[in-house]
Every structure is written in C-alpha cells, then in structure tokens.
Amino acid sequence: MKRHAAIGIFLLSIICLAGGLHPSMAQNAGSPGDAPYPVQLAVGEVFDACNSGQIVCPAKGPICDDPKVATPVDLPGGLGFKGVAPGTTLCSAGSAVGPRRVFRFTVH
C-alpha cells in the first residue's frame, strides 16, 4: 500500500512539474494585479494612493523612476504621488501587507 502511495505521489509531482514548465502556462502566470495601475494626473495634481484601494497603508519606501514627472508626497491619510511635469513614469511603494504596488503615472 505504501509503495502505491509513493508511486502516486511521484507521478503527480512529475505531472505538476511538466505542467509548470509549459510555455503557455508561463505566459498566463501573472495576474491582472501584477500590471502597473494606470493613473492620469495634471501637473500639480495629487493621487492619494492609500485611499485608492490599490495599496494597504501604511505604505513604505515609495520611489519613482523619473522624479521630474511624479514624486511621492505625504498626505494626511498616508502616501500620495504628485504630478510634477508632463510625461510618463513608474512609481511604486511597499504595502503594509503583500508585495510592492506599481503605478504608471501619465502627467499632462
């Protein structure tokens, strides 16, 4: 009986491993939540990240790829991002739970 269980577990492991390596599975591995969250801002406008529902606050370690386009700011409710000049940049912040959340800011 133990031998049959061991063989079953071994075969199940091989099937799971082979399925995980299939290229079509890898393309669909990410969830929609992994994509940068798009945000449109005017110059001087502020996006309240904590009240957006996209991140669990208190957020930590906010960064922007191009601080000439958008920059992190402190708001009464927590973290925000301010549009500085026209352009597009990625910004992110560490969530109180889970991974960092990435935002794609387009400032006009």
Image (cartoon, grey):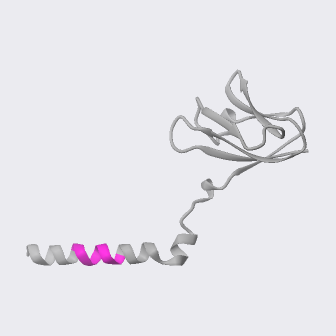
Magenta stretch contains residue 65? no
Q: Answer above or below: position of 47 versus 19.
A: above
Q: Position of residue 22 (x, y in %)?
A: 48, 78
Q: Is residue 39 left or right of residue 96?
A: right
Residue at 13% across / 78% down in the picture?
Answer: 4
Q: Position of residue 33 (x, y in %)?
A: 61, 54
**Most frequent secondary structure within the magenta stretch:** helix
Q: Answer above or below: position of 102 versus 72.
A: below
Quarter location, residue 43: top right
Quadrant in which the N terminus is drawn: bottom left
Q: Answer above or below: position of 32 versus 107.
A: below
Residue at 60% across / 32% down in the picture?
Answer: 59
Residue at 58% across / 71% down in the picture?
Answer: 27
Quadrant in which the C terminus is drawn: top right
Q: Is residue 64 left or right of residue 93?
A: right
The one nearer the camera, 66 or 73, is 66
Furthest residue to the left? 1
Q: Position of residue 10 (x, y in %)?
A: 23, 75
Quarter location, residue 79: top right
Q: Is residue 91 left or right of residue 13?
A: right
Q: Position of residue 42 (x, y in %)?
A: 89, 39
Residue at 44% across / 72% down in the picture?
Answer: 20
Q: Answer above or below: position of 39 versus 51.
A: below
Furthest residue to the top? 76
The one nearer the camera, 77 or 66, is 66
Count the numbered circles shown: 0
The one nearer the camera, 5 or 84, is 84
Q: Is residue 21 left or right of residue 76?
A: left
- In magenta, the rendered stretch is 9-15
Magenta stretch contains residue 12? yes
